[in-house]
């Protein structure tokens, strides 16, 4: 069974200097441990707007979906240029069929309840097939030594583009990818061992504002467990990263439901130390 480290790289870490260091660290760690990496990388439309201003004077005329498609292409090229003799392949993750959306339409029909049950079953089958196909595709690429980059498809996701200041879908994708990879782990012969969220902070704090370097999570009471850490972040509304940290903290708890050994929130500039000596990071494991 091949062990996988799933690394979520946020927008604040996406620059050439950081990526060179991150990819070099991954190379050395892979050679040392034989563990593999899969990257979930945000493609921030706002960041891309700043990049292209020097090239296009009429940047305001671009739709956000168009900017997203340009950025996704640029992001893959950057990873490919900086990676260590590896083929880089990006997979764009689309939104799955949403039960609420289907139900809102069907409920207006006379035969609403019957059609709702039928639609739910169809949705379950379609989404399950998509899950398995995605897991098999990722596994095939990883087994053939391809560096897999996963990214939410901002170009086709209307909801994602409605509120560019609330970009947490790639955080949530860590949950989905962990679930499907570990669900089919026996078939694809690989599993997610760790999920690492790279940020611009070293660790988080508990309800008493004390640094948390190691936390044990009781999955049977996960909502109460979250409150130990949420309260301080919510009270600290002056921090610009409040919303982003809440998203990462929530996801770091949720991934543990799917046989992930540990979830880690780490500083992107010192991130390798979170694997080598558990420093500059907060680790969560199942109690």
Image: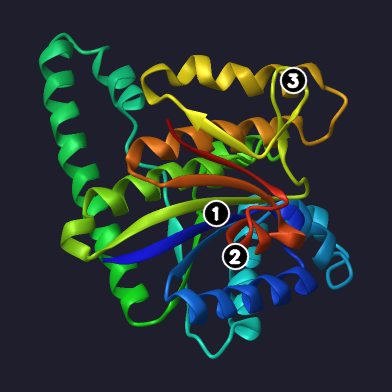
Q: In front: 76, or 259?
A: 259
Q: Earlier in the sequence, mark 2 or mark 1?
A: 2
Image position, residue 27 (x, y; %) = 57, 80
Q: Which residue is mark 1?
A: 155
Is 249 on the left-hand or right-hand side of 212? Answer: left
Image position, residue 58 (x, y; %) = 84, 61
Rendered residue at 24%/48% (across/down): 183
Q: Which residue is mark 2?
A: 72
In the drawing, what numbered circle is on residue 43? Answer: none
- Whether residues under marks 2 and 1 lie with C-beta atoms below 8 angstroms apart, the answer is yes
Distance from Cα at disc 1 to Cα at disc 3? 35 Å
In the drawing, what numbered circle is on residue 232? Answer: 3
Q: Earlier in the sequence, mark 2 or mark 3?
A: 2
Q: Does residue 199 lie above or below 220 as drawn?
A: below
Is 224 on the left-hand or right-hand side of 110? Answer: right
Numbered disc 1: secondary structure: loop
**Dot 3 alpha-carbon crowd within 10 angstroms: few under 14, some 14 to 19, many 20 or more:** some
**Dot 2 alpha-carbon crowd within 10 angstroms: few under 14, some 14 to 19, many 20 or more:** many
Number of marks drawn: 3
Image position, residue 220 (x, y; %) = 36, 19
Look at discs 2 and 3 and give the one toward the viewer.
Answer: 3
Image position, residue 71 (x, y; %) = 65, 64
Q: In front: 264, or 8?
A: 264
Q: Does residue 229 lie above or below 58 as drawn?
A: above
Image quadrant where one finds the C terminus: top left
Q: In front: 35, or 95?
A: 35
Look at discs 2 and 1 and give the one toward the viewer.
Answer: 2
Rendered residue at 68%/47% (across/down): 281
Distance from Cα at disc 2 to Cα at disc 1? 9 Å
The single residue placed furthest to the top in the displayed view is: 110
């Amino acid at each position: 069974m091949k062990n996988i480290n799933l690394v979520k790289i946020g927008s604040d870490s996406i620059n050439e200097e950081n990526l060179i260091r991150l990819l070099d660290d991954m190379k050395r760690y892979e050679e040392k441990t034989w563990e593999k990496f899969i990257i979930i990388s945000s493609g921030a439309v706002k960041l891309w707007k700043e990049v292209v201003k020097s090239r296009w004077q009429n940047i305001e005329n671009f739709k956000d979906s168009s900017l997203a498609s340009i950025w996704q292409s640029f992001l893959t090229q950057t990873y490919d240029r900086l990676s260590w003799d590896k083929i880089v392949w990006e997979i764009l993750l689309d939104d799955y069929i949403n039960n609420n959306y289907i139900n809102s339409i069907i409920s207006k029909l006379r035969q609403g309840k019957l059609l709702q049950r039928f639609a739910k079953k169809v949705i379950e089958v379609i989404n399950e097939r998509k899950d398995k196909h995605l897991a098999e595709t990722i596994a095939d690429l990883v087994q053939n030594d391809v560096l897999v980059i996963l990214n939410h498809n901002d170009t086709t996701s209307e909801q994602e583009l409605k509120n560019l200041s609330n970009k947490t879908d790639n955080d949530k994708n860590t949950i989905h990818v962990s679930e499907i990879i570990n669900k089919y782990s026996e078939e694809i012969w690989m599993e997610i061992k760790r999920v690492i969220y790279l940020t611009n902070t070293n660790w988080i704090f508990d309800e008493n504002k004390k640094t948390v370097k190691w936390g044990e999570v009781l999955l049977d009471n996960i909502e109460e467990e979250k409150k130990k850490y949420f309260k301080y972040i919510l009270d600290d509304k002056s921090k610009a990263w409040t919303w982003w940290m809440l998203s990462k903290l929530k996801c770091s708890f949720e991934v543990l439901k799917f046989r992930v050994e540990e979830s880690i929130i780490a500083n992107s500039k010192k991130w390798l130390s979170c694997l080598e000596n558990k420093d500059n990071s907060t680790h969560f494991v199942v109690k």
